Image (cartoon, rainbow, N blue to C red):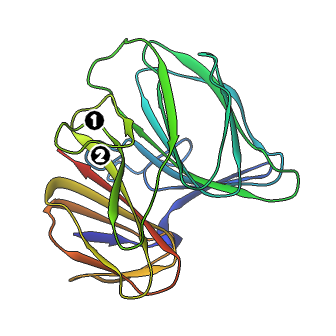
Protein backbone atom coordinates (compact mmCIF):
# COMPACT_ATOMS: atom_id res chain seq x y z
CA UNK A 1 0.00 0.00 0.00
CA UNK A 2 1.45 3.34 -1.09
CA UNK A 3 -0.09 6.70 -0.17
CA UNK A 4 0.49 9.69 -2.45
CA UNK A 5 -0.48 13.18 -1.34
CA UNK A 6 -2.46 15.78 -3.26
CA UNK A 7 0.47 18.20 -3.24
CA UNK A 8 2.69 15.70 -5.06
CA UNK A 9 0.45 15.41 -8.14
CA UNK A 10 1.50 16.78 -11.52
CA UNK A 11 -0.43 19.98 -12.35
CA UNK A 12 -1.26 21.42 -15.79
CA UNK A 13 -2.70 24.94 -16.06
CA UNK A 14 -4.40 26.41 -19.14
CA UNK A 15 -7.04 29.09 -19.77
CA UNK A 16 -9.63 28.49 -17.07
CA UNK A 17 -8.39 24.93 -16.45
CA UNK A 18 -6.42 23.37 -13.60
CA UNK A 19 -5.78 19.66 -14.15
CA UNK A 20 -4.13 17.50 -11.50
CA UNK A 21 -2.72 14.18 -12.70
CA UNK A 22 -2.12 10.99 -10.73
CA UNK A 23 0.14 9.64 -13.47
CA UNK A 24 2.43 10.93 -16.23
CA UNK A 25 0.36 13.03 -18.61
CA UNK A 26 1.17 15.47 -21.43
CA UNK A 27 4.30 17.43 -20.61
CA UNK A 28 4.66 15.65 -17.27
CA UNK A 29 6.64 12.42 -17.49
CA UNK A 30 7.99 10.18 -14.77
CA UNK A 31 8.99 6.69 -16.00
CA UNK A 32 8.25 5.34 -12.52
CA UNK A 33 4.70 6.74 -12.55
CA UNK A 34 2.89 5.92 -15.79
CA UNK A 35 -0.17 4.16 -14.37
CA UNK A 36 -1.44 1.73 -11.77
CA UNK A 37 -3.02 -1.58 -12.67
CA UNK A 38 -5.36 -0.88 -15.58
CA UNK A 39 -5.49 2.88 -14.97
CA UNK A 40 -3.71 4.83 -17.71
CA UNK A 41 -4.97 8.31 -16.78
CA UNK A 42 -6.54 9.62 -13.57
CA UNK A 43 -7.14 13.38 -13.76
CA UNK A 44 -8.92 15.72 -11.36
CA UNK A 45 -9.97 18.80 -13.37
CA UNK A 46 -11.28 22.16 -12.23
CA UNK A 47 -12.94 24.31 -14.93
CA UNK A 48 -13.77 27.98 -14.59
CA UNK A 49 -17.24 29.07 -15.83
CA UNK A 50 -17.42 28.49 -19.59
CA UNK A 51 -13.96 26.90 -19.75
CA UNK A 52 -13.21 23.41 -20.98
CA UNK A 53 -11.80 21.17 -23.66
CA UNK A 54 -12.61 21.80 -27.30
CA UNK A 55 -13.34 18.89 -29.64
CA UNK A 56 -10.57 16.29 -29.59
CA UNK A 57 -10.19 12.63 -30.58
CA UNK A 58 -9.88 9.36 -28.65
CA UNK A 59 -9.58 5.75 -29.81
CA UNK A 60 -9.44 2.39 -28.04
CA UNK A 61 -10.02 3.91 -24.61
CA UNK A 62 -12.67 3.41 -21.94
CA UNK A 63 -13.33 6.90 -20.52
CA UNK A 64 -15.11 7.17 -17.16
CA UNK A 65 -16.18 10.59 -15.85
CA UNK A 66 -17.42 11.43 -12.35
CA UNK A 67 -18.48 15.01 -11.54
CA UNK A 68 -17.57 16.18 -8.04
CA UNK A 69 -19.16 19.65 -8.23
CA UNK A 70 -20.90 21.87 -10.78
CA UNK A 71 -22.14 20.88 -14.23
CA UNK A 72 -20.17 19.48 -17.16
CA UNK A 73 -21.51 19.73 -20.74
CA UNK A 74 -20.52 16.88 -23.03
CA UNK A 75 -20.87 16.47 -26.81
CA UNK A 76 -19.48 13.64 -28.94
CA UNK A 77 -19.49 12.41 -32.50
CA UNK A 78 -21.83 9.51 -31.67
CA UNK A 79 -24.63 12.04 -31.13
CA UNK A 80 -24.82 11.97 -27.35
CA UNK A 81 -24.98 15.47 -25.89
CA UNK A 82 -25.53 15.74 -22.18
CA UNK A 83 -24.94 17.67 -18.99
CA UNK A 84 -23.44 15.80 -16.06
CA UNK A 85 -23.73 16.76 -12.41
CA UNK A 86 -22.82 15.13 -9.10
CA UNK A 87 -24.26 11.64 -8.79
CA UNK A 88 -24.12 10.93 -12.53
CA UNK A 89 -21.58 8.48 -13.92
CA UNK A 90 -20.62 8.59 -17.60
CA UNK A 91 -18.80 6.01 -19.70
CA UNK A 92 -17.62 6.63 -23.24
CA UNK A 93 -16.08 3.72 -25.15
CA UNK A 94 -13.96 5.34 -27.86
CA UNK A 95 -13.52 2.09 -29.81
CA UNK A 96 -12.47 2.74 -33.41
CA UNK A 97 -12.57 6.48 -32.74
CA UNK A 98 -14.72 9.32 -31.43
CA UNK A 99 -14.37 13.06 -31.07
CA UNK A 100 -15.83 14.87 -28.08
CA UNK A 101 -15.77 18.12 -26.14
CA UNK A 102 -16.24 18.89 -22.45
CA UNK A 103 -17.02 22.30 -20.98
CA UNK A 104 -18.29 23.85 -17.79
CA UNK A 105 -22.02 24.31 -18.38
CA UNK A 106 -22.31 27.13 -15.82
CA UNK A 107 -21.72 30.84 -16.44
CA UNK A 108 -20.98 31.62 -12.79
CA UNK A 109 -19.88 28.43 -10.97
CA UNK A 110 -16.77 26.26 -11.34
CA UNK A 111 -17.05 22.61 -12.32
CA UNK A 112 -14.83 19.83 -10.98
CA UNK A 113 -14.66 16.29 -12.29
CA UNK A 114 -12.48 13.19 -12.15
CA UNK A 115 -11.81 11.39 -15.42
CA UNK A 116 -10.14 8.00 -15.84
CA UNK A 117 -8.90 6.22 -18.97
CA UNK A 118 -8.52 2.45 -19.23
CA UNK A 119 -7.76 0.08 -22.13
CA UNK A 120 -10.67 -1.91 -23.63
CA UNK A 121 -10.70 -5.69 -23.79
CA UNK A 122 -10.85 -5.57 -27.60
CA UNK A 123 -9.53 -2.67 -29.73
CA UNK A 124 -11.34 -1.28 -32.74
CA UNK A 125 -14.89 -1.88 -31.56
CA UNK A 126 -17.86 0.37 -32.26
CA UNK A 127 -17.93 3.56 -30.16
CA UNK A 128 -20.62 3.72 -27.47
CA UNK A 129 -21.76 5.95 -24.65
CA UNK A 130 -23.81 5.65 -21.50
CA UNK A 131 -24.60 7.75 -18.45
CA UNK A 132 -26.93 7.28 -15.53
CA UNK A 133 -27.84 8.70 -12.15
CA UNK A 134 -26.64 6.56 -9.24
CA UNK A 135 -27.98 6.40 -5.71
CA UNK A 136 -25.31 6.63 -3.03
CA UNK A 137 -26.63 5.68 0.40
CA UNK A 138 -24.23 6.84 3.12
CA UNK A 139 -21.76 4.32 4.42
CA UNK A 140 -21.95 1.97 1.42
CA UNK A 141 -19.50 1.07 -1.33
CA UNK A 142 -21.60 1.40 -4.50
CA UNK A 143 -20.45 -0.04 -7.85
CA UNK A 144 -21.09 2.69 -10.42
CA UNK A 145 -19.17 1.36 -13.46
CA UNK A 146 -17.98 -2.16 -14.12
CA UNK A 147 -17.00 -4.69 -16.73
CA UNK A 148 -16.65 -7.48 -14.15
CA UNK A 149 -19.24 -10.26 -14.19
CA UNK A 150 -19.04 -10.51 -10.39
CA UNK A 151 -19.50 -6.76 -9.85
CA UNK A 152 -22.42 -5.44 -11.90
CA UNK A 153 -22.39 -1.65 -12.05
CA UNK A 154 -24.73 1.18 -12.94
CA UNK A 155 -23.00 1.47 -16.34
CA UNK A 156 -21.01 -1.27 -18.13
CA UNK A 157 -17.33 -1.00 -18.99
CA UNK A 158 -15.57 -2.56 -21.94
CA UNK A 159 -12.89 -3.99 -19.65
CA UNK A 160 -13.86 -7.18 -17.82
CA UNK A 161 -11.26 -6.74 -15.07
CA UNK A 162 -12.19 -3.26 -13.78
CA UNK A 163 -14.86 -1.82 -11.51
CA UNK A 164 -15.33 1.64 -10.01
CA UNK A 165 -16.97 1.96 -6.60
CA UNK A 166 -17.99 5.18 -4.85
CA UNK A 167 -18.55 5.70 -1.13
CA UNK A 168 -20.20 8.65 0.61
CA UNK A 169 -18.95 8.66 4.20
CA UNK A 170 -19.92 10.70 7.21
CA UNK A 171 -17.91 10.69 10.44
CA UNK A 172 -17.46 7.07 11.60
CA UNK A 173 -19.10 5.60 8.47
CA UNK A 174 -16.88 2.75 7.28
CA UNK A 175 -16.54 0.47 4.26
CA UNK A 176 -14.24 -2.48 3.67
CA UNK A 177 -12.08 -2.31 0.57
CA UNK A 178 -12.35 -5.29 -1.79
CA UNK A 179 -9.50 -7.79 -2.03
CA UNK A 180 -7.92 -7.37 -5.46
CA UNK A 181 -4.63 -7.61 -7.38
CA UNK A 182 -4.81 -3.83 -7.86
CA UNK A 183 -6.68 -1.13 -5.92
CA UNK A 184 -6.73 2.64 -6.34
CA UNK A 185 -8.39 4.77 -3.64
CA UNK A 186 -8.96 8.49 -4.22
CA UNK A 187 -10.54 11.06 -1.88
CA UNK A 188 -12.51 13.66 -3.84
CA UNK A 189 -13.92 15.46 -0.78
CA UNK A 190 -13.44 15.40 2.97
CA UNK A 191 -11.11 13.12 4.93
CA UNK A 192 -10.98 9.42 5.71
CA UNK A 193 -8.81 7.07 7.73
CA UNK A 194 -7.36 4.08 5.90
CA UNK A 195 -6.64 1.19 8.22
CA UNK A 196 -2.90 0.69 8.53
CA UNK A 197 -2.05 3.83 6.52
CA UNK A 198 -3.65 6.69 8.44
CA UNK A 199 -5.51 9.79 7.27
CA UNK A 200 -6.30 10.58 3.63
CA UNK A 201 -7.33 14.13 2.74
CA UNK A 202 -8.94 15.62 -0.37
CA UNK A 203 -6.80 14.81 -3.40
CA UNK A 204 -4.82 12.08 -1.62
CA UNK A 205 -4.68 8.61 -3.13
CA UNK A 206 -3.65 5.13 -2.04
CA UNK A 207 -2.34 2.54 -4.48
CA UNK A 208 -2.37 -1.10 -3.46
CA UNK A 209 -1.14 -4.35 -4.99
CA UNK A 210 -2.51 -7.72 -3.83
CA UNK A 211 -4.33 -5.93 -1.02
CA UNK A 212 -7.78 -5.42 0.40
CA UNK A 213 -10.04 -5.99 3.37
CA UNK A 214 -8.84 -2.78 5.03
CA UNK A 215 -11.43 -0.52 6.59
CA UNK A 216 -11.85 2.99 5.23
CA UNK A 217 -13.59 5.25 7.74
CA UNK A 218 -14.95 8.74 7.16
CA UNK A 219 -13.62 11.40 9.52
CA UNK A 220 -15.44 14.48 8.19
CA UNK A 221 -18.97 15.23 6.97
CA UNK A 222 -19.53 14.87 3.22
CA UNK A 223 -16.50 12.70 2.51
CA UNK A 224 -16.49 11.02 -0.92
CA UNK A 225 -14.08 8.32 -2.06
CA UNK A 226 -13.56 6.63 -5.44
CA UNK A 227 -12.24 3.06 -5.38
CA UNK A 228 -11.02 1.21 -8.47
CA UNK A 229 -10.90 -2.59 -8.13
CA UNK A 230 -8.82 -4.27 -10.85
CA UNK A 231 -7.73 -7.75 -11.84
Q: Earlier in the sequence, mark 2 or mark 1?
A: 1
Badge 2: how crowded within 10 Å, few (<14), some, or many (20+)?
Answer: many
Can you tell which quarter of the image residue 4 is in? bottom left
Label 2, label 1: how many angstroms apart (C-alpha)?
Answer: 6 Å
Check the image and name the residue furthest to the right.
107
Residue drawn at x 16%, y 65% is 212
Residue drawn at x 27%, y 69% is 2
Quarter of the picture holding the N terminus = bottom left
Residue under numbered circle 1: 147
**Disc 2 and disc 1 in contact, CB within 8 angstroms:** yes
Q: How many marks?
A: 2
Residue drawn at x 25%, y 57% is 183
Q: Secondary structure at mark 2?
A: strand
Q: Secondary structure at mark 1?
A: loop
Out of 109 and 149, give the one closest to the viewer: 149
Residue under numbered circle 2: 163
Amino acid sequence: MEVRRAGDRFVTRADGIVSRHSFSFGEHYDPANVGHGLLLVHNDDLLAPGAGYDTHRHADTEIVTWVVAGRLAHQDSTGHPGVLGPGVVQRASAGSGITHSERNASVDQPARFVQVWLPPDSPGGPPSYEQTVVRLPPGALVTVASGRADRPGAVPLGNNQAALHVAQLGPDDAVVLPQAPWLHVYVTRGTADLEGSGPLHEGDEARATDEGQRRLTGTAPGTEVLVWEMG
